[in-house]
Amino acid sequence: MHSDYNNYCFIGRLVNDRELRYNKKGKAFVHFTIASNNKINKEKVLINYFDMKMFGDYALSVESFLKKGQQVQVSGTAEYEKWIDKNTGKNRSRITFNVNQLQLLNFTERKF
């Protein structure tokens, strides 16, 4: 059997504040979306949006720092998800990125 490799690394900014959610088994996870820019040429920039999921205690410990505009570096594995839309009955799918490592970039801790 061949060994395949499923790994990514992105740097981007959070599009919205993170959301704390729970899966069907009741396990908590943090969901957020980042935008990452790729400069094509002098006039054109391609913006990609990536849906991220982060599980476990680490996710719960960093979730309060994940605010809209925060720049992060994330790495982990990609996962193909598919489901049936409850409203339309149509098949839907997307690629979600499971975060194994996260680093806050350009972070200034706020003191209250």
Image: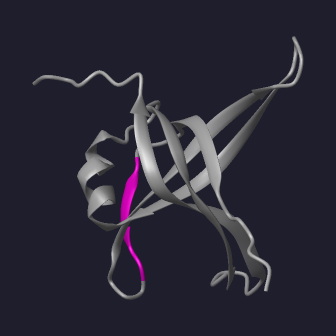
Depth check: give the residue in front, 16 or 12: 12
Left or right side of 38 for 64:
left
Within the image, what quadrant is residue 58 found in?
bottom left
Within the image, what quadrant is residue 112 found in?
top left
The x and y percentages for residue 22 are 36, 75
The x and y percentages for residue 45 are 80, 24
Residue at far top of view: 42
Residue at far left of view: 112
Dominant secondary structure, magenta: strand
Depth check: give the residue in front, 47 or 62: 62
Query: What residue do we see at 57% from left, 43% from top?
Result: 34
90 lies above or below 44: below
Q: Which residues are magenta?
A: 18-23
The x and y percentages for residue 64 are 27, 45
Query: What residue do we see at 74% from left, 76% from top?
Result: 92
Number of numbered discs? 0
Left or right side of 22 for 42:
right
Left or right side of 8 for 31:
left
19 inside magenta stretch: yes
Query: What residue do we see at 33% from left, 78% from top?
Result: 27
91 lies above or below 56: below
Q: What scheme was used to colour the molecule?
A: one colour
Depth check: give the residue in front, 89 or 100: 100
Q: Name the quarter where the N terminus is drawn.
A: bottom right
Depth check: give the residue in front, 61 or 2: 2
104 inside magenta stretch: no
The x and y percentages for residue 86 are 63, 84
Query: What residue do we see at 87% from left, 11% from top?
Result: 42
